[in-house]
Image: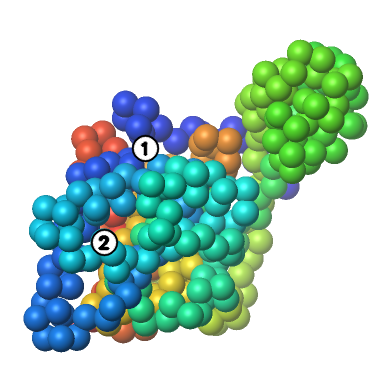
């Protein structure tokens, strides 16, 4: 295996408030929707049901802010649209969705929730095809699986990476929590499956002080994680798959025009993006807030992977997603999120005019 390194930590949102929960951002997109709906209504072409989808709803804070703003702005305009709104919340687990539903209970009549795999939205949301006026995604793509590829001297390589804990640190953690280093992997898997609260109750012998001690264990483990990598030759881009429906040839213009480069392929993000676009109404938009690379030159510096908020995240290859969108008849553009000091970039995609 190649060199190992300690993953860097992505800078958190300024002020401790998530970028995605910004009311100004919500108002901006809501007012844009109202314009579209007003124009369609004037032509008697607006459907009765107005669908909005949020992928990766998490705890529902963003959904609550968005719905509060929507209701407020609609009341100011005479209340035409709130009663017709269908807000769909999607995430990977029923437990996460339960928390989100509690957070938006003031808007319960307007909301539905669905558990789904973010990489294949239409598998669960096929009924929404061609109906969504807004597909909203925040901080999902950077958590989806991705390959990394490298071009050196005209030769292509795939970067293979694995996570590990150095033996010395594993021994230190084991001694602190009275567990052998060999038993650490099983305990870590249990922690990931159960969470610190349930784990502390299931393993009182290891965590006699309760869930705070289990949280401390996770913090020690997370701080000890390292990544190890190696380069494996790629025989040809034609044989490589970005997504199940996208061949590696889409990468050629990106890698051949930029000399030696190491970049993410953003396989999971590209698959999710492509599978979400068919859900859009002809006048709908997809808006995604995430940590995008928007120019290939940005890959000249460090671009992850990085450890952030308990998970490993990767910068998302914006030029690749834009190229994929064009191939399928959509326009995608990027702009800096409207908060000083934020790393977040907004991707907006819609059908090409």
Q: Secondary structure at mark 2?
A: helix
Question: In the picture provided, is 299 more to the left or to the right than 161?
Answer: left
Mark before the other along the chain sequence, 1 or 2: 1
Q: Residue at x 11, y 86 (%)?
A: 43
Q: How is the image coloured?
A: rainbow
Evaluate if marks 1 and 2 touch, with contact meaning CB atoms under 8 Å apart: no
Circle 1 SS class: loop
Which quadrant of the figure contains the C terminus?
A: bottom left
Question: Is 56 above or below relative to 134?
Answer: above
Residue 18: which numbered mark, if any?
1
- The answer to whether 83 is drawn above or below residue 24 in the figure is below
Instruction: Give the vertical position of 45 relative to 132 (above or below).
Output: below
Q: Which residue is mark 2?
A: 82
Residue 220 position within the rendered picture, expressed as x and y whole percent measured from the top left: 68, 22
Residue 175 horizontal side relative to residue 132, left or right: right
Measuring 21% from the left and 80% from the top, which residue is drawn there? 46
Q: Residue extending furthest bottom? A: 44
Can residue 161 be seen in this snapshot?
yes
Observer-nearest of 90 and 342: 90
The answer to whether 133 appears left or right of 90 in the picture is: left
């Amino acid at each position: 295996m190649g060199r190992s390194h300690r993953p860097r930590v992505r800078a958190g949102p300024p002020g401790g408030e998530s970028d995605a929960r910004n009311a100004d951002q919500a108002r901006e997109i809501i007012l844009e929707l109202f314009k579209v709906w007003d124009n369609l209504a004037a032509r008697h072409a607006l459907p009765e049901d107005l669908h909005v989808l949020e992928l990766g709803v998490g705890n529902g804070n963003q959904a609550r802010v968005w719905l509060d703003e929507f209701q407020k702005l609609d009341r100011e305009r005479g209340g035409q649209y709130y009663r017709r709104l269908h807000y769909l919340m999607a995430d990977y687990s029923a437990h996460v969705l339960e928390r989100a539903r509690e957070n938006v209970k003031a808007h319960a009549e307007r909301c539905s929730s669905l558990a789904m795999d973010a990489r294949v939205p239409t598998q669960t949301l096929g009924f929404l095809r061609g109906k969504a006026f807004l597909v909203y995604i925040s901080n999902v793509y950077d958590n989806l699986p991705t390959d990394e590829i490298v071009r050196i001297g005209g030769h292509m390589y795939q970067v293979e990476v694995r996570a590990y804990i150095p033996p010395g640190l594993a021994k230190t953690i084991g001694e602190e929590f009275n567990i052998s280093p060999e038993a650490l992997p099983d305990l870590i898997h249990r922690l990931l499956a159960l969470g610190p609260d349930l784990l502390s109750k299931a393993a009182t012998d290891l965590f006699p002080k309760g869930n705070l001690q289990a949280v401390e264990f996770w913090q020690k483990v997370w701080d000890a994680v390292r990544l190890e990598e190696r380069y494996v030759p790629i025989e040809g881009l034609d044989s490589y798959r970005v997504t199940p429906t996208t061949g590696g040839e889409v990468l050629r213009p990106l890698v051949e025009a930029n000399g030696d480069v190491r970049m993410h392929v953003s396989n999971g993000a590209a698959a999710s993006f492509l599978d979400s676009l068919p859900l859009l109404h002809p006048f709908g938009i997809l808006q995604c807030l995430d940590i995008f690379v928007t120019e290939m030159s940005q890959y000249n510096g460090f671009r992850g992977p990085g450890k952030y908020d308990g998970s490993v995240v990767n910068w998302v290859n914006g030029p690749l997603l834009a190229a994929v969108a064009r191939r399928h008849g959509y326009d995608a553009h990027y702009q800096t999120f409207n908060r000083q000091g934020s790393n977040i970039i907004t991707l907006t995609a819609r059908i090409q005019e």
